[in-house]
């Protein structure tokens, strides 16, 4: 009986080891690039989700700060026997970088390991310059698991329709809040008072205009600071509720990214 229990224990350990770690979550680190690249070193964030079996999918962000970044989707595979994962980036969803820089579509070979409570992904990358067959200058990267995304303060919504409706309401009690709304820095609503009746505007997004950043600026704080609004976003048959807060020092932002495959995934 003891021998049987020992065998079962060993089998259980082998099975657990084969399954590997739970890679779901946010990983953040730095990425280097050999001489000749646009940036010798910058930040990278991987938002990983496990699919069926050993399949991985998610989004990658390459950025110097949250206003200068490139976002792409990726697919990948986890190999438990070697504790490695291979990720392949797809098309660029959006990018906000200097005009003399061109995004690189990357492939990653990463090893997973732990050091105490620290979980680490480390390895190399190579890739092609966007829309060409030219090789990017390759490099290395190292990431650790973190609790939250660097982009959490600016919500991102993926949409697949040409026209997105925005309805701004005063949140909770109507207290005299007034707002100005900008799209990619251009004012589309000026000094509008929030109420129970919505302030309505529209933004256009498609393959050519695949990124729109909405900024809500507080013109005042009302009787009950800060300036708060409920934003109802309607795109096609989908509706989203967002609660926005802005002050005299900091505005609220929402980003819309065009993704033509949303409807296909929902079917």
Image: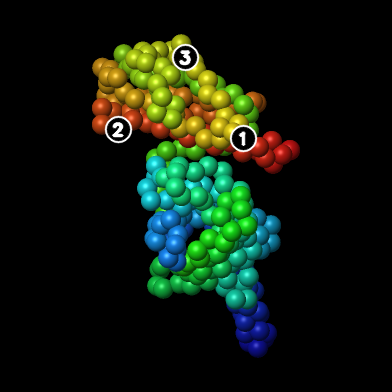
Alpha carbon separation for disc pair 2 and 3: 23 Å
Of circles 1 and 2, the one toward us is 1
User: Which of the 4 image quadrants contains residue 238?
Assistant: top right
Q: Which residue is mark 3?
A: 198
Residue drawn where x is 30% and y is 32% of the image: 250
Q: Residues within 10 Å of mark 1 (few under 14, many from 20)?
A: some
Q: Residues within 10 Å of mark 3 (few under 14, many from 20)?
A: some
> For the view shown, which residue lies furthest in the top direction?
197
Alpha carbon separation for disc pair 3 and 1: 29 Å
Q: Which mark is residue 250?
A: 2
SS for tag 1? loop
Of circles 3 and 1, the one toward us is 1
Horizontal arrangement in the rendering, residue 15 relative to residue 48 (left or right): right
Q: Assign the C terminus to one quadrant of the image.
A: top right
SS for tag 2? loop
Q: Which residue is mark 1?
A: 207
């Amino acid at each position: 009986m003891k021998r049987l229990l020992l065998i079962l224990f060993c089998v259980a350990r082998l099975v657990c080891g084969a399954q590997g770690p739970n890679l779901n979550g946010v990983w953040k680190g730095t990425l280097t690039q050999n001489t000749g690249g646009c940036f010798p070193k910058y930040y990278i964030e991987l938002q990983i989700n496990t699919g069926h079996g050993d399949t991985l999918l998610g989004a990658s962000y390459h950025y110097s700060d949250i206003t200068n970044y490139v976002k792409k989707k990726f697919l990948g595979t986890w190999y438990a026997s070697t504790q490695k994962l291979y990720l392949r980036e797809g098309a660029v969803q959006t990018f906000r970088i200097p005009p003399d820089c061109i995004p690189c579509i990357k492939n990653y070979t990463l090893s997973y390991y732990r050091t105490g409570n620290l979980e680490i992904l480390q390895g190399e990358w190579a890739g092609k310059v966007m829309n060409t067959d030219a090789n990017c200058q390759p490099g290395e990267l190292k990431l650790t698991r973190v609790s939250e995304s660097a982009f959490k303060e600016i919500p991102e919504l993926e949409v697949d329709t040409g026209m997105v409706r925005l309805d701004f309401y005063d949140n909770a009690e109507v207290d005299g809040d007034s707002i100005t709304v900008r799209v990619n820095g251009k004012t589309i609503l000026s000094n509008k008072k929030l109420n129970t009746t919505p302030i309505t505007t529209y933004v256009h997004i498609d393959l050519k205009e695949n990124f729109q950043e909405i900024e809500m600026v507080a013109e005042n704080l009302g009787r009950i600071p800060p300036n708060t609004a409920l934003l109802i976003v309607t795109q096609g048959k989908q509706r989203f509720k967002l609660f926005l807060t802005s002050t005299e020092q900091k505005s609220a932002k929402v980003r819309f990214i065009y993704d033509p495959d949303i409807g296909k995934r929902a079917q």
